[in-house]
Image: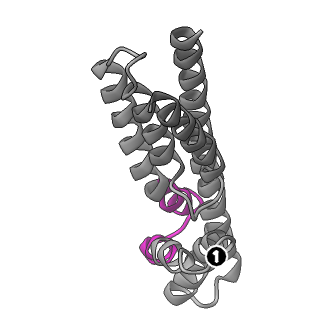
C-alpha cells in the first residue's frame, strides 16, 4: 500500500507542476496532496509542521493566483472596471480551457476599461497588458511552489526509502 501512495504522490507532484502553467489544473493543491500522500505512508514519520506550513503556502498562493492579475491591471493604470473585467474574464475563461483563461483575463480587462472610457483604447490595452503580466507573475509563483514541493517530496522519499 505504501508503494501505491508514494507513486500516487509523485504523480500528483508532477501533475501539480504542470498545473502551475495550465489554468485547468489547480497546481499547488494537487502538489500538496502529493506531499500528503507521502506523509501518509508508514515509512515517513508524520511531520505536521511541514504539512501545515505547506498547506498555508498552498492556500496563500491559490488566493494570490486570483488577486495578482487584478493588481497587475491596477498597476498599469486600470480602473475598477478593468479589475472587474479581469476577474470576470478569468471566470469565463475557465470554461474554455486551456487558452481561455489567458485570453479571458486579457479581453476582460480590455473590455472593462473600454466600458469605463471607450475613447481610451491605448489605456485599455495597457491595463490588459498589466493583467497578462500579473498572470505571468502568478504562474511563476505557482511553478516555484510546485517545484519546491516536488523537490521536498523527492528528498523525503529518498531519505526514508533508501
Q: Is residue 118 above or below residue 92?
A: below
Quadrant assignment, res 10:
top right
Magenta span includes 83 = yes
Instruction: Please give left or right for residue 61 compared with residue 137 in the image.
Output: left
Residue linked to disc 1: 100
Q: Is residue 151 above or below residue 137?
A: above
Q: Is residue 66 above or below residue 112?
A: above
* Frontmost residue, 161 versus 24: 161
Q: Which quarter of the figure is the C terminus placed in?
A: top right
- Dominant SS in magenta: helix
Q: Residue at the location (53% across, 41% down)?
A: 8
Instruction: Please give left or right for residue 112 compared with residue 62 in the image.
Output: right
Coordinates of residue 128 in the picture (x, y in percent) = 63, 70
Image: magenta residue range: 68-86
Q: Secondary structure at mark 1?
A: helix
Coordinates of residue 131 in the picture (x, y in percent) = 59, 63
Q: Crowding at label 1, few (<14), some or many (≥20) Cα neighbours within 10 Å?
A: many
* Frontmost residue, 157 versus 19: 157
Q: Is residue 3 above or below residue 73?
A: above
Magenta span includes 51 = no
Amino acid at each position: 500500500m505504501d508503494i501505491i501512495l508514494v507513486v500516487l504522490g509523485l504523480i500528483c507532484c508532477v501533475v501539480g507542476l504542470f498545473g502551475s502553467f495550465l489554468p485547468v489544473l489547480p497546481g499547488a493543491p494537487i502538489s500538496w496532496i502529493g506531499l500528503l500522500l507521502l506523509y501518509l505512508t508508514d515509512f515517513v514519520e508524520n511531520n505536521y509542521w511541514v504539512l501545515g506550513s505547506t498547506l498555508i503556502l498552498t492556500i496563500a498562493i491559490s488566493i494570490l493566483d486570483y488577486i495578482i492579475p487584478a493588481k497587475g491591471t491596477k498597476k498599469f493604470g486600470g480602473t475598477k472596471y478593468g479589475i472587474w473585467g479581469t476577474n470576470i474574464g478569468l471566470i469565463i475563461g475557465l470554461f474554455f480551457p486551456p487558452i481561455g483563461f489567458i485570453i479571458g483575463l486579457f479581453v476582460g480587462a480590455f473590455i472593462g476599461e473600454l466600458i469605463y472610457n471607450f475613447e481610451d483604447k491605448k489605456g485599455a490595452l495597457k491595463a490588459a497588458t498589466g493583467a497578462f503580466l500579473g498572470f505571468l507573475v502568478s504562474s511563476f509563483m505557482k511553478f516555484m511552489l510546485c517545484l519546491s514541493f516536488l523537490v521536498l517530496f523527492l528528498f523525503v522519499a529518498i531519505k526514508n526509502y533508501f
